[in-house]
Image: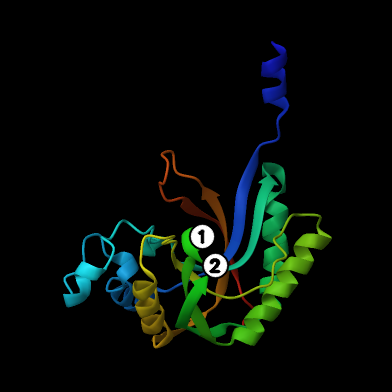
């Protein structure tokens, strides 16, 4: 075996993981109807009277609705043999939390210009959700597993429009999202997902459930 092959053989295999709550079908369909009418979702020039003053639309990297979820913790690359340990940590945290009553509500934008992200917010048992996130992070840290420690802001990522929309278009979209209040649902399990990047540049990632972990029965 060549030195290069030997190095490749000994390289640790990893899986890119995150923990999230799924959005139920009725919440996804209701939100999708609103998002489809936003400027960030349009693929061609607007038909509104002010279109001449607007920049021609380009694809704005809208997240497909099948990938919408509420991230609880981004774990990152974990050795394959430790994926089960991550699931155990999440399961213990899940058993400490009763089901959560939630709804997608409001929205906003992270960042500016080409790095901007448009998101929908959350309403309901948000305080208890944040407590669950802290338990997950503490458990992963204690187990010597990676976890993103940035300030947690519960949200559903809708698009990464960059500079593909004008400031006026962005402002219109944000106003629509801030007025939005979707149907409520009860979240009774969290999910450990594996994230696989697309094979082609710009292709959306695939999210595959690894473990479904029920919250504590009241």
Seen in the picture, residue 53 relative to 196 is either above or below; the reply is below
Q: Nearer the viewer, residue 57 or 67?
A: 57
Q: Nearer the viewer, residue 155 or 7?
A: 155
Residue 89 visible somewhere in the drawing: yes
Q: Quadrant of the C terminus?
A: bottom right
> Picture quarter containing residue 151?
bottom right
Name the element at disc 1: helix
| Residue indicated by mark 1 | 115
Seen in the picture, residue 146 relative to 130 is either above or below; the reply is above
Seen in the picture, residue 44 relative to 170 is either above or below; the reply is above
Q: How is the image coloured?
A: rainbow
> Picture quarter containing residue 37?
bottom left
The CA span between labels 1 and 2 is 6 Å
Name the element at disc 2: loop
- Which percent across, then down, holds residue 5? 67, 17
| Residue indicated by mark 2 | 111
> Picture quarter containing residue 210?
bottom right
């Amino acid at each position: 075996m060549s030195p290069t092959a030997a190095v490749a053989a000994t390289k640790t295999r990893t899986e890119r993981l995150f923990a999230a709550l799924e959005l139920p079908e009725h919440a996804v369909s209701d939100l999708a109807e609103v998002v489809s009418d936003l400027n960030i979702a349009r693929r061609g020039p607007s038909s509104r009277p002010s279109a001449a003053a607007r920049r021609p639309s380009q694809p704005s990297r809208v997240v497909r609705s099948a990938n919408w979820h509420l991230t609880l913790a981004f774990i990152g690359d974990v050795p394959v043999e430790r994926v089960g340990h991550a699931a155990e940590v999440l399961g213990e945290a899940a058993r400490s939390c009763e089901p959560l009553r939630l709804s997608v509500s409001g929205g906003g934008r992270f960042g500016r210009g080409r790095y901007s992200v448009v998101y929908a917010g959350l309403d309901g048992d948000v305080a208890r959700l944040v407590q669950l996130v802290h338990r997950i992070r503490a458990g992963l840290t204690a187990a010597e597993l990676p976890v993103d420690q940035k300030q947690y802001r519960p949200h559903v990522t809708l698009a990464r429009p960059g500079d593909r929309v004008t400031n006026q278009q962005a402002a219109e979209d944000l106003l629509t999202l801030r007025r939005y209040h979707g149907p409520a649902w009860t979240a009774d399990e969290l999910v450990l997902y594996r994230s696989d990047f697309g094979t082609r540049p710009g292709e959306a990632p695939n999210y595959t459930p690894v473990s479904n972990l029920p919250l504590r029965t009241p």
